Amino acid sequence: MELELTENARITYEKRYLKKGAGGEILEGPVDLLRRVAANIAAIERSYGRDEAEIKRVEEDFFQVMAAAYFLPNSPTLMNAGRELQQLSACFVLPVEDSMEGIFTSLKHMALVQKTGGGTGFAFDRLRPAGDRVRTTNGVASGPLSFLKIFDAATEAVKQGGTRRGANMGSLCYDHPDILNFICCKEKEDEITNFNLSVTVSDEFMRKATGADPDPYYTLVNPRTGKPHIDPETGATGRLHAGEVFDLIVEKAWEKGDPGIIFIDQMNRSNPTPGIGNYETTNPCGEQPLLPYEACCLGSLNLGKFSTGEGGVDWGGLRRVIRTAVRFLDNAIDCSDYVIEEIARMHKDGNRKIGLGVMGWHDLLVRLGLPYDSEAALEVAEKVSRFINEEAKACSVELATERGVFPNFERSIYNTGRPEDRVRNATRTTIAPTGTISILAGASSGIEPYFGLAFLRKNILGGVDLPEVNPLFLEMAEKEGFYSEGLIQEIARSGRIPPEEKTVPDRIKKLFKTALEIEPRWHIRHQAVFQKHTDNAVSKTINLSRGATPEDIKNAYILAWEKGCKGITVYRDGSREMQVLNVGVGEEESLKPSSRPATLTGHTTRIQTPLGNLFVTVNSADGKPFELFAQIGKAGSDVVAFTEAIARLISLALRCGVGVKEIIAQLEGIGGYRSVGFGPNRIMSVPDAIGRALAGLVREKSGEGTDHYNSREICPECGTGALIRVEGCAKCEACGYSEC
């Protein structure tokens, strides 16, 4: 049989999932892959007493729901089932104990998990603060940040299974003595690149931060002693103002997207096994609270497939697929080859957590004729999420009757004596990232609104770049008669329907609003409704426009807490400056240098360098740096030549839209033969001096020079697509690359 695949899905299968030979040749097709996975996951039925005919029937059920893209498991299952690795879970949490042995055991376990395609979460709460006493060596501790950087460097060296790069969550509790340094630790974009960061906050902190508690101060706690932290320099008890800490979190999230927030009390209120332990952190994208050494098998339903075509939902069809998916995920627990014995004990022989989630939510809303930002959409979200949660639990009860409850059942909240609580799995539902599997399914990501309605697929062989258009929009455009090549090219250029476009009905414009056109409160309300009926948590990015203020982010964090979310991740459009591209997909056009106006204004700065006085002139256009000239020494020398070359390249970068902060980050700190620096400002080299001159201009203009409206990071894999931020991670729609 042939699968109905988009071109994007076909490319993603070939690049990321299909079995390959030693020379890179493809050894299977998409159908072969799904047959392999279905057979592998169904085979475990034999250990539960099923005969061969029943096993074949289950195998065919598994194959059919995947082949029709009604349901797909997480990527490690597609990659590894029936192959050598056989590690099938996507997310893990590993403990970080306050000892060298504990820290480096966790580092080793991280490498083993990531090698097989899993993502790892770490709470660094237990590590003593920087400067604290180390009794065994009579030295001082380097603190959690130093070890966070070691974990980050190790992840950089581990390529997950040859197909997935490492992904981590690093969290620190708000009352840890090093919390302020943690909040600020990703100010430089080339540091700690393999971690999402979150601050773990309590309800008490949020009450103090929002003014609900009249006392805004709280005490820092030394995790080594469990007592109030004493500042080693002043001898004073460490106390912080919750409102100021909250504002710092908001400021850094506004600047770079990190840190997010974990509402730890909300998570632990829904902890199904408090007798085993409390949650400390989550997996990399925040959707899976896990105890130390726990794992979870994930999969997602494609909701866009369950429209009746008459404005309704196919509840019967959805029920059948849910039950097949829950059985599939429970089987996957037994089929998985756990690389660490402690994980096997906690997952397979402990809580048997699964996480059934969704993708294609915006697709379903479009088919139902409901705008994402509408009360009607939220009403459907309530019905759909409740239905999935109830049906998943009912199926888990049936599996418990057939196979037994999960081993830690007696120490769980389900040990009530009621038959309806005798479940096979401690949790059943999670809204997880669907980065690449949503591409395979041709579905919108998770519960996210569309990020863009079209992008240009780059032809790497030099042919014509062709627009890839949202299939539902294309279907409606052709059906209702407003399709035109010009319209599609315009949408591909900007990513959305131009507001002034007269040929597209207003009703269609409302249905196809994109993430940045939808107010943040609607994003949060969707997350909160799904969270209400989800056992674990919800992975979602609250996308904000470039012009959003820190106050907008602050309000989003507060609303998420008030609405019962378990965590929140925000991303302000264009706030990361590395490898920028313009929104939409006219990338090639956007990277052409802007034309130089006839007249520009600027100013010149003199800086002392180890090689003599350097004069840096920066000219601006529309309030933004546009070109740079630099002069040093006498004409004809090598120093003059390389100084002029640097200036020309910086001017070209500025005219192409590269952010000033990124240029500064690349230049500042470059050392010459006087590594200690020269002159009153300790200038280390000519590049360092130019970087500092630009930095002074940025400070003087209060950040105006960093504005590059609607910018994007370039995909590190294909080098042409723009990374979008959805579901708590970055994703390239052009090639299928995903951080998750």
Image (tube, rainbow, N blue to C red):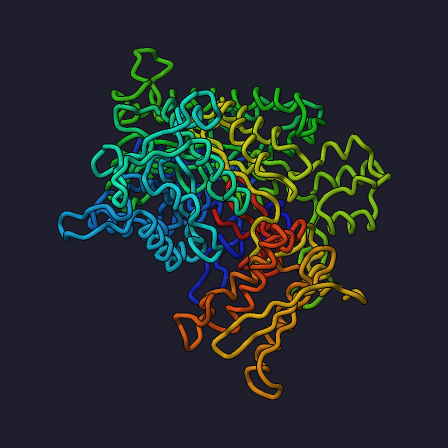
Residue 291 vs 597, above or below: the answer is: above
Q: Nearer the viewer, residue 346 or 214?
A: 214
Residue beneath the point at 73% across and 43% down: 496
Q: Where is residue 457, by image quadrant?
A: bottom right
Which percent across, then down, holds residue 136? Answer: 13, 50
Q: Residue furthest top?
A: 418
Residue beneath the point at 64% across and 48% down: 6
Q: Count all numbered tags in the image, as a single digit.
A: 0
Q: Nearer the viewer, residue 213 or 67?
A: 213
Q: Nearer the viewer, residue 621 or 555?
A: 621
Q: Where is residue 631, by image quadrant?
A: bottom right
Residue beneath the point at 38% across and 38% down: 332
Which percent across, then down, holds residue 552? Answer: 59, 34
Which percent across, then down, holds residue 668? Answer: 50, 64
Is 12 on the left or on the right of 139, as rendered? right
Is 240 on the left or on the right of 683, as rendered? left
Q: Residue furthest left?
A: 136
Is 62 on the left or on the right of 365, as rendered? left
Q: Is residue 63 visible?
A: no
Q: Is residue 480 visible?
A: yes
Which percent across, then down, holds residue 200? Answer: 39, 34
Q: Nearer the viewer, residue 107 or 441?
A: 107
Residue beneath the point at 47% across and 55% down: 188
Q: Residue furthest bottom?
A: 636
